[in-house]
Image (tube, grey):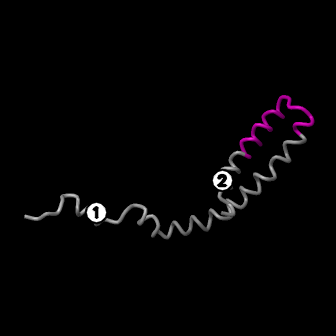
Amino acid sequence: MSNSSPTAPIDRLPRLHELVDSWPLRRSLEVVAAPLRFIAFWAAVALPFLYLPLLAGGLEGQQLTVFVGLLLANVAALVLGHEHGR
């Protein structure tokens, strides 16, 4: 009789993270992600300057919608650009 457990063949299979790390697609995604992070980072820096004219003139009607859209765009840029420069 063998002392091996029934899960031993599963242990010989490569782990999922090892498969993902070896995919050529991962390198392609990294090449695309770096410029996206750069753009998102600087967009997160620049977008608050667009709030100033809206806030100075008061938020009425359509301007409130534009302000909320800018705020959501800034949050998205902050999330996407968070890893830039690390």
Q: Residue sitting at 23 percent across and 62 percent down?
A: 8
Q: Amino acid at mark 2?
A: Leu
Where is residue 64 shown, x and y percent of the image?
A: 81, 33
Residue ranking furthest to the front: 3
CA neighbours of label 2 inside 10 A, class few (<14), some (14 to 19), many (20+): some
Q: Nearer the viewer, residue 68 or 14?
A: 14
Q: Residue sitting at 77 percent across and 57 percent down?
A: 42
Q: Main secondary structure of the magenta part?
A: helix
Left or right placement of residue 60 versus residue 11 in this view: right
Q: Quadrant of the C terminus?
A: bottom right
- Kindly identify which residue carries mark 2: 80
Instruction: Identify the magenta region.
Output: 54-74
Residue ranking furthest to the left: 1
Where is residue 37 shown, x and y percent of the image?
A: 67, 59
Q: Is residue 24 above or below residue 77?
A: below
Where is residue 38 shown, x and y percent of the image?
A: 71, 61
Question: Residue 78, labelled with which disc?
Answer: none
User: Which-is-in-front pick, marks 1 and 2?
Assistant: 1
Left or right placement of residue 34 versus residue 2 in this view: right
In the image, residue 28 lies in the stretch drawn in magenta: no
Q: Residue sitting at 81 percent across and 52 percent down?
A: 46
Q: Amino acid at mark 1?
A: Asp
In the image, residue 66 lies in the stretch drawn in magenta: yes
